[in-house]
Image: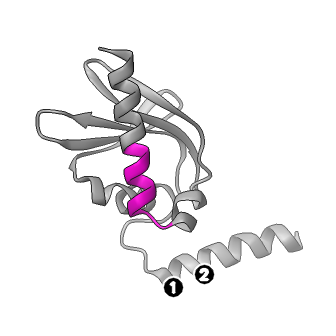
Amino acid sequence: MNKSHTIDVAVTIWQQLKDFTDYNVLWSWGIHNVRAATLGSQSGLAFDVNGFQFKGTVVIKLDEGADLYDICLVQDGKLAIARSEVYFDELGSIIDDIVERREGMSDEEYGQMVESAYSEKLYA
């Protein structure tokens, strides 16, 4: 695997995440340690998150043959959650559902969860 190609893929994924995911949603995941990644013969992007529902590493790898992505969430060195055959414009919403919300959670329920969590921290 060519290092330059891996970096190009990682930069493309990062740009797609930023272009198709609301800024506030993206940063609500507590993203840090963003880096290019290779998994076997696949190039991708990895970053650590500190969300309400998931804390660990998100790895997005490109399936070049299908031009789709696989999302792997790793916690304590073990694969916790995986989603396959994801289109570039779905990356942010799928990751948000796993990292920050519970799948199917409404905006109202999410707002209540956030408000409750922060009021507990402020008044504890």
- Residue type at mark 2? Gln
Please state, as top left, top right, bottom left or bottom right, where the N terminus lies in the image. Answer: top left
Compute the Cα span from label 1 to label 2. 6 Å
Secondary structure mostly taken by the magenta-highlighted segment of the chain: helix
Please state, as top left, top right, bottom left or bottom right, where the C terminus lies in the image. Answer: bottom right
**The image quarter in which residue 58 lies:** top left
Asked which secondary structure carries label 1, the reply is helix
Q: Which of the pair 95/20 is nearer the observer?
A: 20
Looking at the image, the residue that sits furthest to the bottom is 108
Q: Which residue is mark 1?
A: 108
Q: Which residue is mark 2?
A: 112
Q: Position of residue 24 (x, y in %)?
A: 57, 67
Magenta residues, start to end: 13-22
Q: Which of the pair 78/51 is nearer the observer?
A: 51
Q: At x 62% / y 52%, what residue is drawn?
A: 30
Q: Position of residue 117 (x, y in %)?
A: 70, 70
Q: Position of residue 82 (x, y in %)?
A: 31, 43
Q: At x 60% / y 75%, what residue is drawn?
A: 113
